């Protein structure tokens, strides 16, 4: 249910949509406002309906170089002891909580 006014933000444009059905409003204005409200609801509906991705403890390889932030999932490595693809330093095995990949 809509309140007395609804603030919408789209492409950095703010507009105020008053409650529809005021005395003296034309049906064209009512239809335009109704259309804006429907589009706004549809735009934000997709973001809220997504299911959260479960996070699991995952084995990863992390770069040992302090200046490098490189890491990769263990199951994406083709070597038993990989080298960092960014700086070519040694990598060590550790565990991180990451989104599950199926």
Image (cartoon, rainbow, N blue to C red):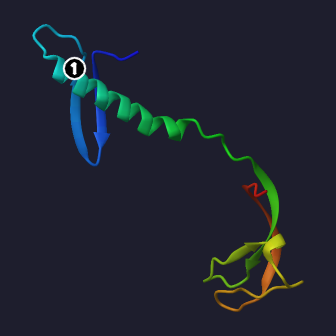
Relative to 64, residue 47 above or below: above
Residue in the picture at 79% in, 74% down: 76
- Front-most of residues 81 and 19: 19
Choose top left, top right, bottom left or bottom right for residue 39.
Answer: top left
Is 43 situated left or right of 73 in this image?
A: left
Relative to 95, residue 48 above or below: above
Is 17 situated left or right of 91 in this image?
A: left
Q: Quadrant of the N terminus?
A: top left
Report crowding for label 1: few under 14, some 14 to 19, many 20 or more residues within 10 A (C-alpha).
some
Choose top left, top right, bottom left or bottom right for residue 63.
Answer: bottom right
Residue in the picture at 84% in, 82% down: 78
Residue marked by disc 1: 30
- Image location of residue 5, percent across then percent down: 27, 21
Q: How many marks?
A: 1
- Residue sticking out furthest to the top: 23
- Image location of residue 43, percent across then percent down: 42, 39
- Residue sticking out furthest to the right: 80
- Front-most of residues 66 and 18: 18
Choose top left, top right, bottom left or bottom right for residue 68.
Answer: bottom right
Relative to 89, residue 40 above or below: above
Is 58 situated left or right of 65 in this image?
A: right
Q: Which secondary structure lies at badge 1?
A: helix
Q: Quadrant of the C terminus?
A: bottom right
- Residue sticking out furthest to the bottom: 88
Residue in the picture at 60% in, 83% down: 67
Relative to 47, residue 68 above or below: below
Residue in the picture at 65% in, 82% down: 66
- Image location of residue 92, percent across then percent down: 81, 79
- Front-most of residues 57 and 53: 53
């Amino acid at each position: 249910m809509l309140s007395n006014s609804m603030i919408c933000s789209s492409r950095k444009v703010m507009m105020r949509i008053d409650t529809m059905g005021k005395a003296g409003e034309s049906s064209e204005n009512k239809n335009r406002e109704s259309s804006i409200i429907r589009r706004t609801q549809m735009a934000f509906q997709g973001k809220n309906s997504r299911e959260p991705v479960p996070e699991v403890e995952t084995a990863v390889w992390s770069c040992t170089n302090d200046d490098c932030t490189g890491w990769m999932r263990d199951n994406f490595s083709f070597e038993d002891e990989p080298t960092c693809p960014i700086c070519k330093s040694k990598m060590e095995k550790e565990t991180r909580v990451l989104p599950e990949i199926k």
